Amino acid sequence: MKTKTLKKNKVNVVTLGCSKNLFDSEVLMAQLKANKFDVEHESMSDDAEIVIINTCGFIDNAKQESIDTILRYAQAKQEGAVDKVYVTGCLSERYKDDLEAEIPEVDAFFGTRDLPRLLKTLKADYKHELVGERLLTTPSHYAYFKIAEGCDRPCSFCAIPLMRGKHVSTPMEDLVNSAKSLAAQGVKELMLIAQDLTYYGLDIYKKRNLAELIEKLAEVEGIEWIRLHYAFPAGFPMDVLDVMNNNPKVVNYLDMPLQHGSSKILKSMRRGIDREKTEALVNEIRAKVPGIAIRTTLIAGYPGETEADFQEMYDFVERMRFERLGIFTYSHEENTHAYLLEDDVDEKTKKDRADQIMELQSGISFELNQQKIGKVYRVLFDRIEGDYFIGRSEFDSPEVDNEVLVKKSEGFVRIGDFATVEITSADHYDLYGKLI
């Protein structure tokens, strides 16, 4: 028996996982809206007739969060709080048969490339004229900008190729048109994302074409910042750094997951690069783009990681002094190459090692932030929280990096606008400043 009145044709889209998933949800929502659905993202009102859950299947924690969310809405359906529950995304792509057997309350499961089929199930038309159109879930002044889907890399620990398929670049003209559309909506910052940015163009242009793409995007009027996420170190296209140096719209920021600091572990991970070459690459990037902020991601507790291997990674982080760093504990993923190895580092040791790296990074971050006191930066303001306007410098991406806080009592700035800020104090992960 229904316990509440549900709004017909109202869809609540729930997104789990990474920015690439968020991008996919925004595309789905634009299609639904064009088909006259009332669509919301992660609605608080809980009055939607239909719920679509866009899942993540990357590592254990993400999979568990996705399963818990599906179970929550399956229960809500049983109680009459929603009418239909659909599941899409990475977890659904990878474990569709298991999920169908375990959670029969879900009306249908779809994979990562099943958007037309999902729309058809909802009696909606896939509108080809909307290719590149999205309903933004981020603040209106920035957007994640996916330039390719899938991955051809053979990394031993990674299940993404199982869920996302082979690398497919989006044609340059389509991306430029999308950027123009976003700029017309008021977007000022594009955060380029893909499983691997550096592979862009190899499939359709037969060469690495990221630099040319960035140059074309920078020509779009209204776009003021272009930020690069998820670059692969092996075979990194150095011409990208020339564009970064020569074009003020391309911020001095690079997100390049390196995964480890031990040559032995990197070889087992099938990363195509050792620690020495990684260090040389990072040093060359810094020499070519002075002042660049490099964000990286590491994995603790990979199979066979000894105390000596961990120490090598620790020393690597200490030497390289990355501006931004995150670390995961290793997740043993079936059907990956590393699944053939024994998952021989216990969970406590994995966590302890990750914690040690983050404690080290916290100290590095604090020291680097202290050096910014007295300096002046261009800051893009994202939101108001309590007594502060909160923004970011070019060296920071939303939600994962440092923020710049300016007291409301000391001046006014509009959200979505740039302002010049002098840094007056700093802690481990935040900068405090005054408007100039």
Image (cartoon, helix red, strand yellow):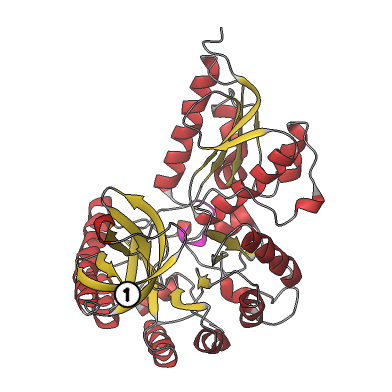
**357 vs 331, nearest the viewer:** 357
For the image, the number of numbered tags is 1
5 falls in the magenta region: no
Q: The disc labelled 1 sits on which kind of residue?
A: Glu
Q: Is residue 377 above or below residue 19?
A: below
Where residue 288 appears, x then y in whole percent?
44, 92
Write the start and end of the magenta stretch as one range.
334-338
Residue named by callout 1 = 323
Q: Is residue 41 above or below residue 105?
A: below
190 lies left or right of 353: right
What is the quadrant of residue 313 in the picture? bottom left
Quadrant where the image shows the C terminus: bottom left
At horizontal 56% and vertical 10% (from top left) the residue drawn is 2
Mark 1, other Cα within 10 Å: few <14 / some 14–19 / many ≥20: many
Quadrant where the image shows the N terminus: top right
Where residue 242 appears, x then y in whole percent?
54, 90
